[in-house]
Amino acid sequence: MPVFCGEMTLPDRQEIIHILNEIEKILFPSYFGINGLMGITPAEFVEKTLVNIYYQLKSQLKNALSLSKWTGAKKVFDEADLDKICDEFIDELPNLQEMLLKDVTANFEGDPAAMSKSEIVLSYPGFYAIFVYRIAHELYKRKVPFVPRIMTEYAHGKTGIDINPGAEIGEYFFIDHGTGIVIGETTKIGKWVKIYQGVTLGALSPRKGQSLSGVKRHPTVEDNVTIYANTTVLGGETVIGENSVIGGNSFITSSVERNSFVSIKAPELIIRTDD
């Protein structure tokens, strides 16, 4: 049900989550769409589900546009673009599926604990966060307000992984473990990148607030980079060069050349016994 505030109609968070669930059925029908067949053919199931996604999404886009008029939100689409955005989004689903299958491959090849690709799709929080991000990013690119962030914040709450929908993330992306990861809005990530829990790809200084909107303020991570746990990389001019490995607990505010290995000096351990 839509939520009303005076003459303003708010996006419905539960409906947006339902849209994500419906998209999951389309992109991974063998895992999430089986119960939806209910005596109909797979082709009929796909058609029915796509129609539902289209009209549910259009309804939430209308709500987002209504709210944006009241709040003065930036990067807002025109009302005439509603059908165009929904059409383009539905047309993009096969490409999203292909991209996500590459992410599954990266997860499987990068994690020796993975028993199968099915385990990744069904249970890995990192993969779920990537799935939601890639859906939200398509709407973000089309200047849809509110809805993309509602999607990624839902994934954030569910997985502990915070990916802004504005980030640009290439193919074969792998998040290992994942809890506590933060990826900022203007982050750019290349192909075959692997990051571990607690990694922050953030802004160097957000104190100027809205004056920094639209400015590249988060780092760039090039192809084939691995960033280990609890590392912080800050700044829009910071580039982690391709084929580099960043050791855990590093704090980086300047660029790293390609083919580098970055580590911090091991702390001194003091071990006492009762003897």
Image (cartoon, grey):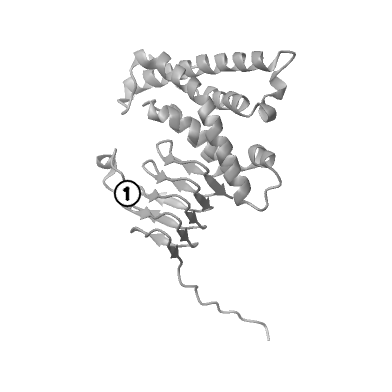
Residue shown at 60%/79% (left/top)?
271
Give the answer, above or below, for where 122 lies relative to 190.
above
Q: Residue at x 71, y 24 (%)?
A: 34
Q: Residue at x 29, y 48 (%)?
A: 207
Q: Residue at x 55, y 23 (%)?
A: 19
- Front residue of 157 and 238: 238
Residue 226 position (above or below residue 269)? above
- Decide if residue 194 is on the left or right side of residue 183: right
Q: Which residue is at the front of the view, 64 or 188?
A: 188
x, y percent for residue 195: 51, 51
Q: Where's residue 237, x and y in %?
A: 30, 51
Q: Amino acid at mark 1?
A: Gly
Q: Residue furthest bottom?
A: 275
Label 1 neighbourhood size at 10 Å, few (<14), some (14-19), many (20+)? many
State the image quarter where residue 250 is shown.
bottom left
Task: Give the residue pinned by disc 1.
Answer: 236
Q: Give residue 95's position: percent from left, percent from top.
A: 51, 29
Q: Of helix, strand and loop, which one carries label 1?
A: loop
- Quarter of image, res 102: top right
- Between 248 and 5, the residue placed more toward the observer is 248
Residue 217 in view, yes or no: yes
Front-most of residues 259 and 124: 259
Give the farthest residue toward the right. 39
Residue 92 coordinates in the image, percent (x, y): 48, 25
Q: Image quadrant of residue 242?
A: bottom left
Drawn side of residue 14 relative to residue 241, left or right: right
Q: Is residue 3 visible?
A: no
